[in-house]
Amino acid sequence: MAEKFGKITVETCEIEGLKVITPSVFGDERGYFMETYNYNDFAAAGIDVKFVQDNQSSSKKGVLRGLHFQINYPQDKLVRVVSGEVFDVAVDLRKGSATFEKWFGVRLSAENKKQFFIPKNFAHGFIVLSESAEFTYKCTDFYHPNDEGGLLWSDPEIGVEWPMPEGMTRDDLTISDKDKVWGGIKDFTAK
């Protein structure tokens, strides 16, 4: 279901708390203008959080980052792509949630200008589908290097259906050493 709040349209997802946001884009022969964040519009949409840190990454085609989370200092995130295209994924880690261990994915691109709001206590990751992508995100807590957690991107218990970039297979993906060795959801729930 989509609902308009000021200059944004917000779609709720089948996992409570996740929201896909599409900003209003005003274009003419010169180009376009859009507000990427307006506290009042977001608060009206139920996203009443205080962002304290902005991050940006650049990745090439076939890079898969994730599935990451902060353990003791969880973060709400507002993510978007400013160049290229990614498939972005959130996994519900809220114990007691009706959708615990379920995942949701959305394509984010410079072309569709969609944003994805991911609340605290979700694992997050993305795969780059275009030749390259610049990915930006706002966080509600600072990054704490000793507080990193993760889930194996290919855990069959979670079952994320990662789309492969054109001309690539899973064997061609670029994944960090750390992301190759995270445990699965069963390891997470055993804690």
Image (spheres, rainbow, N blue to C red):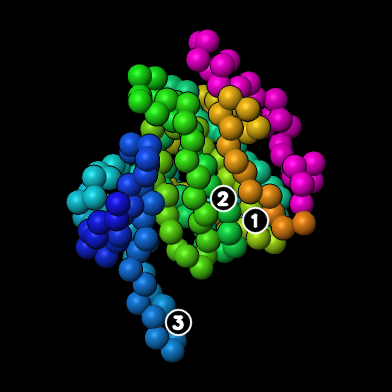
Q: Verify CB contact (< 8 Å) between mark 3 and mark 2.
A: no
User: Please, what is the three-letter code of the amino acid marked with disc 1?
Assistant: Leu
Q: CA distance from mark 1 to mark 2?
A: 7 Å
Instruction: Pick whichever, 176 or 1, lies toward us.
Output: 1
Determine the residue located farthest toward the right in the rendered image: 171
Q: Which residue is mark 3?
A: 31
Disc 1: CA contacts within 10 A as few (<14), some (14-19) or many (>=20) = many
Q: Is residue 157 above or below residue 80?
A: above
Instruction: Find residue 52 and report its horizontal and vertical position in percent.
Output: 37, 43
- 89 to the left or right of 156: left
Label 2 secondary element: strand
Q: Which residue is mark 1?
A: 129
Instruction: Find residue 83 and report its horizontal and vertical position in percent.
Output: 57, 64
Q: CA distance from mark 1 to mark 3?
A: 25 Å
Q: Earlier in the sequence, mark 3 or mark 2?
A: 3
Disc 2: CA contacts within 10 A as few (<14), some (14-19) or many (>=20) = some
- 179 to the left or right of 73: right
Residue 55 visible in rendering: no
Q: What's the magenta region? A: 168-191
- Labels in figure, total: 3
Q: Which residue is mark 2?
A: 87
Q: Is residue 57 above or below residue 24?
A: above
Residue for point 35% across, 24% down: 97
Instruction: Pick whichever, 128 or 33, lies toward us.
Output: 128
User: Please, what is the three-letter code of the amino acid marked with disc 2?
Assistant: Phe
